[in-house]
Amino acid sequence: MATPPQRVTYDGTIERVDEIAPQTRSFVLRLPPAPRFAFRPGQFISCLLPVGGDTIIRPYSIASDPEDPSRLEICLNLVPNGLGSQYLFTLRVGAVVRFTGPWGTFVLDEPPHAECVFIADGAGIVPIRPMLRRALAHATQAVRLHYAAAAAAHLLYAAEFEAAARTHALFSFAPVLHGSLAEEIERQYVSADDERSRHFYICGVGEIVPRLRDLLRRAGYERRAVQYEKW
Amino acid sequence: MARLRVLFENGAPERVIDFDPQKAPFQHDGRPGSILDVLLAHGVPLEHACGGNCACTTCHVIVKGGLDKLSEAEETELDLLDKAPGLTPTSRLGCQAVIEGDVEITVVIPRFTINAA
């Protein structure tokens, strides 16, 4: 009988835990040198968490850049009744998190040869952070970030995005704290002009993601120019 | 009762699962009554790295019989399938394809998923 391919697991040791927003923690995992964990900006890991005598699978997007193979950052909200986040929030420096990966096809290896628009809702900013950094490192055209959160305190990595907007002439950062993210996107990228060569990368939780996808595709943007990940 | 016949591209022995679709969900990952739900509840470890949330392609299966007896694929699933290795005209994501009613479905579990080591 043929043998199925072995699933490779990695053990990351928690090196640092930071409460970066209310009920939101960043975990930096130190990785062993072998097997080397290589990933692409936008991908996620699938954590194998021992909860209630069982092993539960929980996906968490990678917040850090792939250029450092020795460390990996994930960032998550404490979800009410969420078994995975509640378990991870009990962990301290030195604890080990087992995971598989990298997974996911929502990736950006290099920026498109077009205006590049990132749209994040809430925790959807996590995979977009390394995608944005990769885009900025090679950008030749405008790169924009629209990032919606419930309040300013819930904007993750905001200081970093503000600093990038000050230093990078092609980059603009637009936090969305009041009003509708969908309305802003429609106003700026559908109603304002007939330009339809832009590329979009959308990530968030729930129905806002397909809503934005449908809005842009129906407005005439190419299907493959509207990439998204819905959690 | 419904029947799910499972063939494995890697040569593992065929499995035949009889189940009552009215009793879904059978476990906690994937849509209730989906191919993933039924397989996991019956000890067939179909990969589902995103937790069965329609955010990856690791639960890709190829439907060999009963395709029209499954719930219709939505756009998110179709966009993901576009990126699945070994895509066929009858490919589905196991976490999204719900077995509707007392029907017989046959699926093949491909040898590789996109990130298999």
Image (cartoon, rainbow, N blue to C red):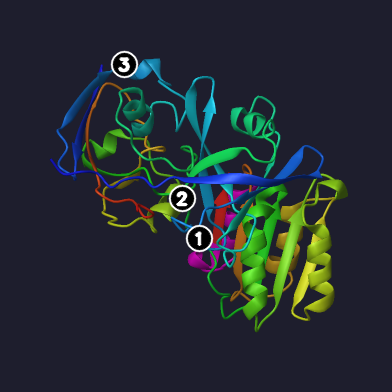
Name which residue lies at 83% across and 69% down. A163
Q: Nearer the viewer, residue A17 or B95?
A: A17
**Residue A203 location in percent, x, y?**
62, 53
**Residue A50 location in percent, x, y?**
52, 28
Secondary structure, mark 2, is strand
Secondary structure, mark 1, is loop
**CB of mark 2 within 8 Å of CB of mark 1?**
yes
Real-space Cα separation, disc 1 to disc 3, in angstroms: 41 Å
Q: Comparing marks 3 and 2, which lies closer to the viewer?
A: 2
Q: Is residue B28 left or right of residue A228?
A: left
Residue B86 falls in image quadrant: bottom left
- Residue to which mark 2 is pinned: A101
**Residue B50 location in percent, x, y?**
48, 42
Q: Quadrant of the N terminus of chain B?
A: top left
**Residue B4 location in percent, x, y?**
24, 28
User: Which amino acid type is marked by label 1?
Assistant: Phe
Q: Is residue B74 above or below residue B114?
A: above
What number is the disc on residue B36? none
Say few, some or many: other residues with alpha carbon within 10 Å of mark 1 (under 14 / 14 to 19 / 20 or more): many
Name which residue lies at 68% across and 32% down. A79
The magenta span reads A208-226
User: Which amino acid type is marked by label 2?
Assistant: Gly
